[in-house]
Amino acid sequence: MSWDQIVGHRNVLERFQKSAQRNRLASTYLFVGPSGIGKRTFALKLAQSLLCTATAESELNACGQCPSCQQVMSGSHPDLITVAKPADKTIIPVKIFIGDDKHRRQEGLIHDLGLKPFYGGRKFAIIDDADYLSALSADTLLKVLEEPPPNSILILIGTSPHKQKETILSRSQVVHFSALSADQVMDIIQRNGQIEGEVDLPKVVEAANGSVELAIRLSDPDLLDFVDLLYSQLASLDPARDDFTKTLGAFVDSAGKDSKLKRQRLFEVGDFAICFYRDLLHRSAESNDLQPNLAAQGSAALDRFRQTGFSTSVTQQAVAACIRRTLTMQSEIHANAMPANMIANWLVDLGRLCRAEASFEMV
């Protein structure tokens, strides 16, 4: 895959090209932005370009043919370490970084990153799902962040700086990735055939907020209908109205009997809420009044915002507070908190923040 095949993020590529040309690459980067927009794909292409044995590092352009490039593409490169949250876990276990009890400091990402590069060049590590680092996992990374092995690069991939521990955030160069355009999402999906069957593709793409991953998930009609309802509730200034607490609780319970699946679904609902609020902030970047920006949009969802009065009465400060409150809710999920009143409190607080009935400092 060439850089030309990576849709969007041209500004991020140019940043890395300049750093490579000046030999000023950092040891640790934190990639943040909505899920499903290509951050991991970008990180792998960056790794391939820096590990390529046929082209100079300053060119940042992998040949795609040498053994090193081929091994990156197949996931077998000895100098590339990739880790992510296991599907059955709510956090990334600390043993992924330092080994299990029997092999402490003898295996794991930190051990492997400190080994001499197999090809004599760089060691490269990618931590996907960095939003799910526990406090202990973040602490174990502290030494490698403060004293990185020579010629090593570590990339953490998350969705927001606000979801990262301070030990990570303060020692990383943050790289912001923007959501893709609707046309870009549509192009990727159609080119790769990632959604099949009878699906209202334009509606799915609109609801996905620039994320290919969300578009694929929203091809499930039941999930798409629920997200549409969620957005309507959030736009109403009273998300808890019409017994929506019970509706949301039933939707979470429908994930299955396993409590982990229920927590994962509620966390996902939080992600959709954050997408909703971030979209409002993005559209109102040049004004504290959301109305002028929303008025220029033609979607049915934004029409509903205008009808409810959301766009004329809610400030950017309130929207940002709603994002912080949602992140707090997601943190409570990680702490294994799943009582029904947690859902109710979250919805009520969102309404109070939007109606200016609560202090923005409460979150």
Image (cartoon, helix red, strand yellow):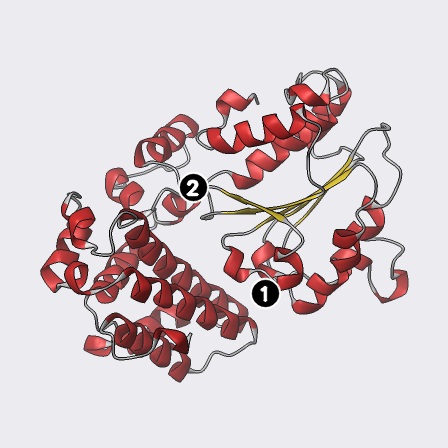
In the depicted structure, whether residue 268 falls above or below residue 126: below
In the depicted structure, whether residue 45 falls above or below residue 162: above
Q: Secondary structure at mark 1?
A: loop
How far apart are labels 1 and 2 at the CA level? 26 Å
Q: Quadrant of residue 87?
A: bottom right
Q: Nearer the viewer, residue 24 or 40?
A: 24
Residue 321 on image: x %, y %: 36, 67
Q: Secondary structure at mark 2?
A: loop
Q: Which residue is mark 2?
A: 178
Q: Residues within 10 Å of mark 1 (few under 14, many from 20)?
A: many
Locate residue 186 relative to residue 61 in the image: left or right: left
Residue 127 on image: x %, y %: 66, 49
Residue at the spot 31% in from the left edge and 53% down from the top edge = 281
Residue at the spot 41% in from the left edge and 68% down from the top edge = 326
Residue at the spot 26% in from the left edge and 50% down from the top edge = 284
Residue 164 on image: x %, y %: 58, 60
Quadrant of the image containing the N terminus:
top right
| Of labels 1 and 2, the one closer to you | 2
Q: Which residue is mark 1?
A: 90
Residue at the spot 30% in from the left edge and 58% down from the top edge = 227
Q: Quadrant of residue 134?
A: bottom right
